[in-house]
Structures are given as C-alpha cells and as structure tokens.
Image: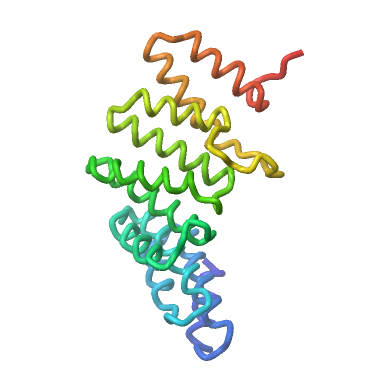
C-alpha cells in the first residue's frame, strides 16, 4: 500500500510535473496489484487524453475491469482501442488478447460471445505481430471456445495445433512458451480420454509433453 500512497500523493501534489502521469499510472498498477480494481480504474481514467501513457493506462484499465468481473466494460474499451490499429502492430495484439479474454469470459452466459471469441482468436493467429506465446494463448482459448460451443472435433484440432507448433509462430524465439502449450496438451488428452482413446491420450502425455521436458527424458 505504500507505493500506491506515494504515487497517488505525488500526482496530487505536483499535477503539473512531467512525471505526474507516470505517478497516476503506477498508482493504478499498485491498486490493481493490491486487489482494488475499482480504485485502479479511477486512477487510470484520471490520466489526460493527450498523455503518452494513455494507451498503456487503457490496457491496464481493461485488466482492472476483468479483475472486477466487468468483462462487458473491458470489451467496450478494447473495441474502442482497436478502431485505429492494424494487425501488424504490436498494440493491436495486446488489445486483441484482452478482447479475447473478455469475450471468452462473457461466453459463460452468451453463446454469441463464444463465437466472437473464436473469430478474435483466429485473427490473432494470423497477426504477423503476434509471438509464440500470443499464438499459443489464442489457440488454446479458441479450443476452449469451440469446446464450449459443442464443436469438440474442432476443439481437439485447435489444442493439437498448439501442441504440435502448427500456429506459424517464429521458431527462433529464445524463450520457449510452456504455459499454454501445457494447458492445450492437458485439454487434448482429456478429450481423448473421454472418447476412450487412451492410446491417443498417452501419446500426448508421453511423446509431446516429454519432448518439451515436462515429465521425463528418454534415456
């Protein structure tokens, strides 16, 4: 709480200081980290429209909306930010990932949101600005959306695309992506097990996860 207090007080005491916007932004991040998304949203919204940190603050505001359970509000912000962005730009990727997360969350009660999540995920997969982690995340959420839509065959294929590296990500990345890879493998194996295809599930666990050093190495 000390960081939040310090940043907030600096912004209030020195509103004309060149670093006042930074203080507001970091105060918002501190509030979000402390589990107070409502205060974070208030702070992010207090940055002036012409601030160099305005886009970063709006992205963080989407994160705060998600933390507060206001996925519809986060989606509105994401859609407004996408208006002047192109898929070959890194900011477009960051905004679209948050849009995807909001659409998927809203899909718990709205089938149309799940269908829109599939479209958003597919757009991310085509983006030249998306890296391996971005594409694996989009591929995984695409699979989860398809699964919830009852399109199990397509969902399994989506998970396997993540697992087998078929998403067109740059293979030269110095930091391999593990989180979404592991989740996709687990979901794919779960579908195989549900279908009684234990051989297929075992192949995923042994041949794929082992090869990425999650479980064991072959001697």
Left or right side of 64 for 17: right
Displayed quadrant of residue 213? top right
* Percent x, y of residue 161: 50, 30
Q: Nearer the viewer, residue 94 or 70?
A: 94
Q: Tell me the residue at 54%/75% (across/down).
A: 7
How many discs appear?
A: 0
* Percent x, y of residue 8: 49, 77
Left or right side of 213 for 125: left
Can you name the residue that lies furthest to the right here? 219
Q: Is residue 124 above or below residue 211?
A: below
Q: Tell me the residue at 42%/39% (across/down).
A: 141
Q: Tell me the residue at 63%/43% (across/down).
A: 170
Q: In this view, does 6 lie above or below 33?
A: below
Displayed quadrant of residue 18? bottom right
* Percent x, y of residue 171: 66, 39
Q: Is residue 205 above or below residue 146?
A: above
Left or right side of 165 for 158: left
Q: Nearer the viewer, residue 151 or 4?
A: 151
* Percent x, y of residue 136: 52, 39
Quadrant in the picture for the C terminus: top right
Q: Which color scheme is applied?
A: rainbow
Q: Tell me the residue at 50%/50% (across/down).
A: 127
Displayed quadrant of residue 83? bottom left
Q: Nearer the viewer, residue 162 or 60?
A: 162
């Amino acid at each position: 709480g000390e960081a939040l207090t310090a940043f907030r007080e600096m912004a209030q005491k020195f509103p004309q200081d060149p670093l006042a916007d930074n203080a507001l932004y970091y105060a918002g991040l501190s509030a979000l980290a402390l589990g107070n998304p409502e205060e974070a949203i208030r702070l992010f919204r207090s940055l002036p429209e012409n601030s160099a940190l305005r886009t970063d603050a709006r992205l963080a505001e989407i994160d705060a909306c998600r933390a507060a359970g206001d996925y519809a509000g986060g989606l509105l912000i994401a859609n407004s930010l996408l208006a002047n962005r192109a898929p070959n730009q890194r900011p477009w990727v960051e905004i679209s990932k948050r849009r995807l997360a909001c659409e998927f969350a809203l899909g718990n009660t709205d089938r149309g949101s799940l269908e829109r999540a599939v479209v958003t995920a597919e757009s991310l997969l085509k983006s030249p600005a998306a890296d391996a982690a971005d594409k694996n995340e989009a591929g995984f959420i695409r699979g989860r959306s398809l699964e919830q839509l009852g399109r199990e065959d397509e969902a399994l294929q989506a998970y396997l695309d993540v697992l087998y590296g078929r998403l067109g990500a740059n293979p030269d990345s110095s930091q391999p992506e593990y989180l979404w890879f592991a989740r996709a493998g687990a979901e794919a194996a779960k579908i195989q097990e549900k279908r009684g295809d234990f051989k297929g599930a075992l192949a995923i666990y042994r041949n794929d996860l082992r090869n990425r050093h999650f479980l064991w190495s072959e001697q």
